Amino acid sequence: MAIAAITSCTQTADPALMVQAGLLAERAVEAGLSAEPWVKTSLSPGSRVVEEYLRAAGLLPALERTGFHIVGFGCMTCIGNSGPLHPAMERLAEHRAIEPVAVPSGNRNFAGRVNPRTALSSLASAPLVVAYALAGSILHDFDHDPLGSTRFPWSPGSTLRPPATASDRPGGHRPGPRHPGPGEGAAAPRRRCDHRPHLPRGPDPADSAAGHWPAERHVARRDRNQYSTRRSNHEVMLRGAFTNPAVTNLLPGTQSGAGAHAYTADRARVLPVYDAAPTYREAGDDLVGMGVLPLEFPEGDSAAAHAFTGEEDLTFEGLGQLRVGTNRVILRLQGNDGRSTTAELRLRILSRQQLDHLRHGGILPYVVRRSLQGP
């Protein structure tokens, strides 16, 4: 166990579960128990009302004594703001001597979401988060092993679920390139495993491209903080995309790994990435909403067939006459050696709304410009 967090997004909206967590903490204090020192604990309710009723019930002191101090209100651990792990955990994880695990009470548990070191993450109720912090290990068997000198039996009929036997590792993709135009360079061709867009979370690793960028500008390590504190800095966030463990970058020498499975666009199924990809091309809204042109190679052609190196100049023809339907776009690649190749691409736009979003560069500029125009 590396992180045990009662988060703001789900469980803290249920007073019954929060009171259960407080009662468990109270019993733990009576038995002389607290969270194991290597477990990073936190309580970040979504509302100050949670603090008020826990304090009124006399349960807040027990939560604090077991390690669950209120660290703030709103999104924190779930968006990667957990900060670094215990120093010993960081060292062991760096040398692959352990596999750090996070147990948040939220609704996000894909690899690296909570912390770059925690590829494994299990969602749990608030009282179960407290229990795992006391146990110190995700392998603890609550049915047979006591947490301490006092046994806390779990009812066989309890609706609290045990951790999943395998973590959910949906595929991911990095934010796409800007609108392509004459002279645009290749950013990073990807395999067909597009997933919902997820910006990097947690601290930026010092040995990553995102870590080098502030270091080169003499930002002290202690001041670099989290990705989210620089979410408006495209220089950091673009580089941070390459730290995503679920991204496969097909440019030579920059392979970063890819998940084997991904959610379908409607989040209803988990399929192999090659089977899940077509559902995103059919939906299309995730990329279009960011102003990214969802260009596709036709059947029988792919990025791999053109040996991208990242040094080519790219020119796209046909973007000035886009319409709803399937658009034909010509890609011309000019290499440093003077050689050029041509590829035919297709760009499918499914609605007038998608077309408007693309013309404005995404949903945000579209909405801003509409608002400025007035009613």
Image (spheres, rainbow, N blue to C red):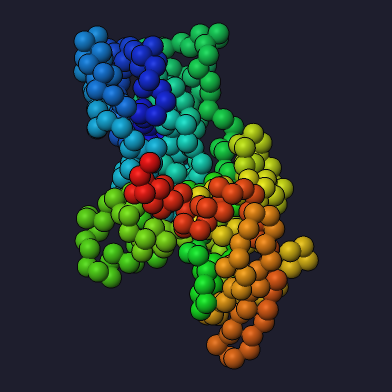
Q: Residue at x 69, y 58 (%)?
A: 326
Occupied quadrant, residue 333: bottom right
243 versus 85 height, above or below: below
Residue furthest to the right:
300
Q: Position of residue 212 (x, y in %)?
A: 34, 67
Q: Position of residue 206 (x, y in %)?
A: 34, 61
Q: Residue at x 51, y 8 (%)?
A: 155
Q: Position of residue 173 (x, y in %)?
A: 54, 53
Which quarter of the image is occupied by the N terminus?
A: top left
350 versus 347 height, above or below: above
How many badges with numbers are in the image? 0
Q: Residue at x 52, y 72 (%)?
A: 181
Q: In this rendering, would 218 be left or right of 163?
A: left
Residue furthest to the front:
375
Q: Nearer the viewer, residue 38 or 364?
A: 364
130 versus 38 height, above or below: above
Which quarter of the image is occupied by the C terminus?
A: top left
Occupied quadrant, residue 207: bottom left
Residue furthest to the bottom:
338
Q: Residue at x 62, y 70 (%)?
A: 318
Q: In this rendering, would 73 be left or right of 354?
A: left
Q: Nearer the viewer, residue 122 or 150?
A: 122
**Residue 39 shows in this picture:** no
**Residue 293 shows in this picture:** yes
Q: Nearer the viewer, residue 147 or 362?
A: 362
Q: Position of residue 189 (x, y in %)?
A: 59, 66
